[in-house]
Image (cartoon, helix red, strand yellow):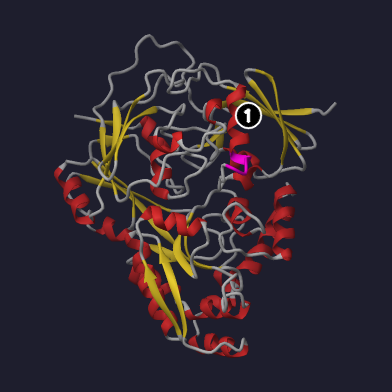
Amino acid sequence: MKSLRTFTLTCGVAVAAVVSGPALSAPLQVAVEQSPSGLDPHIVTAFSSFQIIDGTIYEGLTALDNDLNIVPGLASEWQISDDKTTYTFTLREGVTFHGGDAMTSADVVASLNRVLAENTGSPLASRLAAVDSIETPDDSTVVLNLSAPSAPLLSSLTSIAIVPAKYEDDTDSLQRAPDGTGPFKFVSWRPDVAITLEANADYWDEERPALEGVVFNIVPEAATRQVGLNSGQYQMLPNIDGVMAQQFQGAGGVQLEETLELAYSLIGINVSRPPFDNAKVREAINYAINRDDIVAAALFGAGVPGGPLSPALTNYALPLEEFGCFTPSADKARALLEEAGIETPIEATLLVLPRDSTKGIAQVVQQQLAAIGIDLELDIPEIGQFVQNWRNSEFDMFVSLNSGTIEPDDYFYRTFRTGGSTNVFKYSNETLDALLDAGREETDTAKRQEIYADAQRELACQGPAAFLTYGQLYTAMRDNVDGYSISPTRSMRSLGGTSVTE
């Protein structure tokens, strides 16, 4: 029988019974740029969806605190076998779904199976690739048996929401009417107008939430959002870029929080379409790009040039000097195209995520690539169409943001491994696959650092993405908003502890 090491973590949850909680603040009026593409936590990929549902409506077995440490979520504790292939989770007591049903181990199993099911098409499926089988000894215990050790498992589980078992085979209902365990319950969605949440009176943490609810107002016009915050019509503009943040510098009644985000901007390349199937062409694109100019012109200086991993991952990210192609050289780029036997001009379409920052990036990249004979036509659809085209690999190239976490595996495995659940590039590289498989199974930190250093070198210049920038992320709030902490993951989980004073 395997011996067990026990990990029991606490996260400040009140343990004494509370007869009646504190009076709740009035609903928080939030203004966001885009409508979500959907609200199903196992299907959506857009940040516009993620920031509304993560940690507010939905929760995972594990969670991240404000310092990005892994802490208990819906699991109050876990045990890991000495061979690191068995994880036993004890579920938190007193958790109910917003629909009224108590959460049990059956819901956890159904949620994980739903993510893994081919018909769900979940972009999170790769994060559970090591799970071989799941057992439920009782209603409050879940045992994950792994085919091999999985160093990123606990981190991966922070992003996999637990939903009621009745939705295991249903991929439609949760897109419009979410049903989670979080501090806020879904009330209504008025398309292109607002999404309204209300306080979950039965939330397992009796000290939360402190708000009566949250209203996410859909306000595409940046100027309207700015005027609304200044006037007090809105109390929060979350996850804005440096361009908008500049408008609030020194503004009376407004406070700014900032952090370097873990997400990165990139030019994605469909390697199944000539001439982008040629690695030298992809390398030429990297040489043609001046990342400092992108930071200055598109991000107004609010960010840093970046490689395959965020510089915030100090234990793993290589310095940009390691990558020769990050030193701009139009001459080197043209020489690579000539070596590849590619005639210019090359005409291609760049699919653009409809955000202010990515539109700006697209315009700068369009000019930079034109200098080496790659003429880009910009295609800027609405968000739903962008996601559909992206998921179906209907692009020559795209400019977007990819999410990041505290775990390098989350950056690479599902995105760049052969058959990865978000490998929309149609990229396959046996050397990289072997590295990513090894990185998952290796638990020694020093050895993992070596593995992911090699993975970064493999991807940086000839991979299917030109890594561009990591932006400075801001949240602007009225000065009577208390308790909110901006997250480099863009999660708004801390809304559960946020209040508004009169």
Rendering coords of residue 196 (x, y %): 30, 33
Along the viewing direction, whichever of 444 and 180 lies nearer the viewer: 180
- The quarter of the picture where the C terminus appears is top left
SS under mark 1: helix
Rendering coords of residue 280 (x, y %): 61, 80
Image position of 150 (left or right of 168): right
Image position of 468 (left or right of 106): left
Image position of 44 (left or right of 496): right
Mark yes or no: residue 301 visible.
Answer: no
34 vs 377: above or below: above
Instruction: Give the prevailing secondary structure in the magenta stretch.
Output: loop
- The magenta-colored residue range is 115-119
Q: Name the residue under label 1.
A: 109
110 vs 225: above or below: above
- Corner quadrant of residue 135: top right
- The quarter of the picture where the N terminus appears is top right
* Residue found at x 20% / y 46%: 229
